[in-house]
């Protein structure tokens, strides 16, 4: 499931029904998950999200603001957290809208406890994946920042599929110079092959358009 | 003479002997003849030539007249002028007159060479058949009347006015009058005269008769042409009426207005009206007359009897004409007659299944009776009018019935929808209420099982979860208790309620919620508000629901002052009102009525009721729940309830 070194996952619950909040908290604790429950959306927004994988269990009907609107609000505020929706009277358009906006699951009340746990695990897994990707990209970016301006330029051209001779011609330098820069790029980016370097350039968005 | 007789007559060639002899004889005979009877032969020749010329002139004149007749577009004047002129010239007369006979008198149509004074007098006074007059003789004889000297005629000597006029103003002495006969009926007269006493010759009389015959043809042609035009006009009018009638308009007034104008014009009436039989239709149409014609005519009471043409027409059920109402001893509507100034009146009934449903009245401001043809025409119009009225009546009735049907169908549909909606709302509300505790039970159960599976089992958590499950179960059963309380044996729960007190109670229970949302509350509660009879719990729930709606409406509306205003007061004599007004963004006017249909529930806290359910409760209290936009913004929900004690006989369903 997770590596021992991983940070503690947290489940957030927003529902204005106190009894259900407590029941859900208890359910998540029983499988060893950390739980934070809130009666309203603004209360949730006041806390800082922890670094570990997170998942939000949200009631569609909230006082004042619907769960779906809150989902949009979170996305606008660039708060990236997987959402499991609960509804007392879910209808299909509502479900479709939530799922399209990236909801993990849409559970009608009353739901089976196992379905809720599965949905939350799926949400946490998704968050884990997102964080891993984000970490790798950050590492790549750090490596890319160690390149000189000329090396960054040559990385863009090489990954666009240009040959050394073409690059030399385009930049007005000798082919030898290009070879040296290229070697530095491979080393500093820890790329084992040109194909890997191309993937890195894609992830960083520095790959030039092919000629 | 003897010789001439022997020779075989004057100018005749002598037969026999040799050619030479004959030739010489002929020559000598001719010479002798020329010598002996020059004047006779010459005058004979001259006479022949003159006759020839006369005949050719006559032919020429006749051709000209025929040409004129065939070219005339019904206008007789140029034809008459030409005929007169030709006849006078060819008969060596001085002057002439053409008269038209209308069955009553001879009317001057055309004159030639007559003094202006004569024309003026004759135009003013048509020739009536007076004693001894030429007119009487003309009528009696139906043949030419030739008077050698009118000044010696017994009629003149007896002082007969028309004869005196002819002699003294017209200067006529010898006169020749030829009747214009059509199918042996007198249609006019053709008269030529001389200012001196010199009788006309037989040939001249023949010529005049010939021209008179042409005048008859011309008159007949003109009559036919006129008839044709009239028929065309009538057809055009009939077509127009049909067009109006078939337009199937609901506006009967417009149809009848057009119709009365047409009939008046076609029949040559100066004023006209369609009087309705009030029990059948009410549109009243008039044509012509003073500005207040309609008021004057509409204000008349037509009493049965002979006093009015209206009453006579209604009684007879067929057209009734009075040539001159002033000459009618039985006519009674003198005041109206003076106001409108009519003389000749024609009443034509509008007959529907033989019964008059109205009357067309045609009037003329001078004494001039309507002809048989005009009466028939008016009857045709009357028939059309009846069709138009009938069509319009049927259309209106049809539309009314259709509307009625649509209304009742809509009413049924609405009722059915309301019932369905209420039922759906109730079911949805119940299921929503029960889902919450069930979800809770399921979660707590799952938690308890898992805590039991821990090593060692976490009995503390298990106990807590099980306790919560028990509570959840109670809560679920509470939902059913609430439902039963609200909709079950509602009757039992009825009591006398002070609505003001109810408002204050609900507001205080919701005070924290209102404060949390930063809502100011205003109360404007009428003192001495009569109590209502109702179910306290249900009414409380409705009010809570309306206030929660208001809170939600204002919650979405940032930056504005949030004000909740509650008002109570009397509504009419035996009802009271309670309004809940918010300062939110308001309801889309299009949605105003739908909000009670659409299924809207608020989040459950206790018993969350939708608007549909609220309305159902108020309906059961014999009241109304409605929503209107507030000023300047927001919405007002208004409850109206019957006040006072509930009547014993009135049992709730």
Image (cartoon, grey):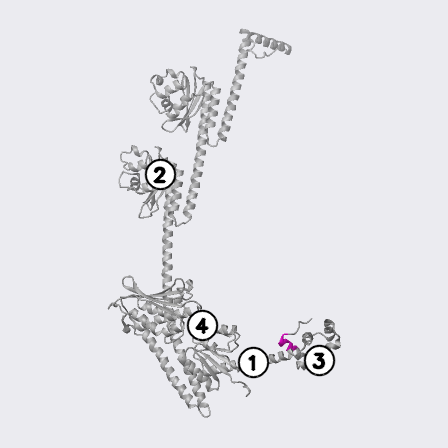
CA neighbours of label 3 inside 10 A, class few (<14), some (14 to 19), many (20+): few
Residue in the image at 43% along x and 40% along y: B235
Q: Are marks 4 and 3 on the same chain?
A: yes
Mark 1–mark 3 distance (CA, rounded to whole Å): 31 Å
Tell me if residue A12 is in the magenta stretch.
no
Q: In this orientation, does residue B360 appear?
A: no
Residue B616 position, x and y percent, is 34, 69
Q: Which mark is residue B290?
A: 2
Q: Return the residue nearer the eye: B242 or B36.
A: B242
Residue on which the image places disc 3: A183
Mark 2–mark 3 distance (CA, rounded to whole Å): 115 Å
Left or right, A150 with respect to B204, comes to right
Quarter residue B440 falls in: bottom left
Mark 4–mark 2 distance (CA, rounded to whole Å): 74 Å
CA neighbours of label 2 inside 10 A, class few (<14), some (14 to 19), many (20+): few
Residue on which the image places disc 4: A65
Q: Nearer the viewer, mark 2 or mark 3?
A: 3
Residue on which the image places disc 1: A131
Q: Chain of mark 3?
A: A
For numbered disc 2, what is the local secondary structure?
Answer: loop
On screen, residue B359 above or below B145: below
Quadrant the C terminus of chain B occupies = bottom left
- The magenta region covers A198-205
Question: Magenta residues: mostly which secondary structure?
Answer: helix
Q: Are marks 2 and 3 in contact (CB under 8 Å)?
A: no
Mark 4–mark 3 distance (CA, rounded to whole Å): 57 Å
Q: Are marks 2 and 3 on the same chain?
A: no
CA neighbours of label 1 inside 10 A, class few (<14), some (14 to 19), many (20+): some
For numbered disc 4, what is the local secondary structure?
Answer: loop
For numbered disc 1, what is the local secondary structure?
Answer: helix
Earlier along the polypeptide chain: callout 1 or callout 3?
Answer: 1
């Amino acid at each position: 499931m997770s590596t021992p070194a991983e940070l503690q996952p947290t489940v957030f619950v927003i529902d204005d029904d106190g009894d259900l909040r407590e029941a859900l908290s208890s359910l998540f604790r029983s499988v060893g998950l950390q739980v934070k429950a809130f009666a309203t959306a603004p209360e949730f927004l006041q806390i800082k999200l922890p670094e570990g994988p997170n998942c939000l269990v949200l009631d569609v009907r909230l006082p004042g603001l619907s769960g779906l609107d809150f989902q949009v609000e979170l996305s606008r505020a660039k708060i990236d957290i997987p959402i499991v929706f609960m509804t007392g009277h879910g209808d299909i358009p509502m479900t479709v809208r939530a799922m399209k906006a990236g909801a993990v699951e849409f559970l009608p009340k009353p739901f089976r406890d196992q379905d809720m746990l599965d949905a939350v695990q799926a949400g946490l897994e998704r968050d884990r994946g997102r964080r891993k990707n984000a970490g790798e990209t950050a590492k790549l970016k750090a490596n890319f920042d160690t390149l000189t301006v000329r090396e960054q330029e040559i990385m863009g051209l090489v990954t666009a599929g240009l040959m050394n001779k073409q690059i030399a011609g385009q930049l007005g330098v000798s082919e030898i110079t290009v070879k040296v820069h290229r070697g530095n790029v491979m080393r500093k980016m820890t790329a084992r092959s040109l194909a890997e370097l191309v993937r890195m350039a894609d992830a960083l968005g520095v790959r030039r358009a092919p000629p | 003479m003897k010789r001439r007789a022997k020779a075989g007559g004057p100018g005749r060639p002598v037969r026999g002997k040799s050619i030479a002899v004959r030739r010489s004889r002929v020559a000598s005979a001719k010479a002798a003849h020329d010598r002996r009877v020059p004047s006779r032969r010459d005058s004979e020749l001259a006479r022949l030539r003159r006759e020839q010329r006369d005949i050719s002139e006559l032919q020429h004149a006749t051709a000209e007249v025929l040409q004129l007749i065939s070219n005339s577009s019904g206008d007789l004047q140029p034809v008459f002028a030409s005929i007169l002129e030709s006849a006078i010239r060819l008969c060596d007369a001085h002057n002439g007159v053409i008269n038209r006979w209308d069955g009553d008198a001879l009317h001057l149509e055309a004159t030639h060479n007559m003094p202006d004074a004569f024309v003026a007098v004759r135009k003013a006074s048509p020739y009536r058949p007076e004693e001894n007059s030429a007119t009487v003789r003309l009528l009696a004889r139906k043949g030419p009347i030739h008077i050698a000297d009118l000044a010696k005629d017994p009629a003149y000597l007896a002082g007969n006015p028309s004869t005196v006029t002819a002699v003294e103003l017209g200067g006529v002495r010898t006169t020749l009058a030829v009747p214009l006969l059509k199918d042996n009926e007198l249609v006019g007269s053709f008269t030529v005269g001389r200012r001196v006493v010199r009788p006309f010759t037989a040939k001249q009389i023949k010529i005049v008769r010939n021209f008179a015959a042409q005048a008859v043809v011309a008159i007949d042609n003109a009559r036919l042409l006129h008839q044709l035009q009239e028929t065309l006009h009538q057809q055009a009018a009939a077509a127009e009426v049909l067009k109006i009638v078939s337009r199937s308009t609901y506006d009967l007034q417009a149809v009848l207005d057009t119709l009365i104008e047409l009939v008046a014009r076609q029949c040559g009436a100066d004023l006209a009206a369609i009087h309705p039989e009030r029990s059948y239709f009410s549109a009243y149409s008039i044509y012509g007359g003073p500005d207040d014609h309609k008021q004057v005519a509409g204000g008349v009471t037509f009493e049965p009897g002979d006093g009015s043409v209206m009453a006579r027409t209604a009684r007879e059920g067929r057209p009734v004409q009075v040539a001159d109402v002033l000459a009618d001893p039985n006519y009674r509507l003198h005041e109206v007659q003076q106001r409108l100034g009519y003389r000749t009146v024609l009443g034509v009934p509008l007959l529907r299944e033989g019964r008059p449903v109205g009357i067309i009245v045609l009037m003329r401001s001078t004494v001039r009776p309507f002809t048989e043809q005009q009466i028939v025409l008016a009857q045709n119009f009357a028939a059309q009018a009846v069709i138009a009225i009938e069509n319009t009546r049927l259309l209106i009735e049809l539309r009314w019935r259709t509307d009625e049907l649509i209304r009742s169908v809509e009413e049924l549909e609405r009722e059915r929808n309301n019932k369905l909606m209420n039922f759906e709302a109730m079911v949805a509300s119940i299921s929503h209420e029960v889902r919450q505790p069930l979800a809770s039970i399921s979660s707590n159960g799952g938690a308890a099982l898992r805590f039991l599976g821990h090593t060692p089992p976490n009995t503390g958590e298990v106990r807590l979860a099980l306790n919560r499950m028990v509570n959840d179960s109670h809560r679920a059963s509470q939902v059913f208790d609430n439902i039963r309380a609200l909709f079950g044996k509602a009757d039992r729960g009825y009591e006398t309620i002070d609505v003001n007190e109810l408002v204050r109670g609900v507001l205080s229970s919701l005070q924290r919620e209102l404060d949390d949302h930063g809502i100011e509350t205003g109360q404007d509660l009428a003192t001495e508000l009569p109590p209502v009879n109702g179910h306290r719990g249900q009414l409380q729930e409705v009010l809570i629901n309306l206030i929660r709606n208001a809170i939600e409406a204002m919650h979405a509306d940032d930056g504005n002052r949030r004000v909740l205003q509650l008002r109570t007061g009397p509504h009419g004599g035996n009802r009271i009102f309670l309004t809940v007004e918010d300062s939110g963004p308001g309801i889309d006017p299009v949605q105003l009525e739908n909000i009670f249909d659409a299924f809207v529930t608020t989040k459950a806290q206790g018993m969350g009721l939708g608007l549909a359910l609220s309305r159902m409760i108020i309906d059961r209290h014999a009241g109304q729940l409605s929503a209107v936009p507030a000023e300047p913004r927001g919405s007002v929900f208004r409850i109206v309830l019957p006040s006072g004690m509930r009547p014993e006989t009135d049992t709730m369903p």
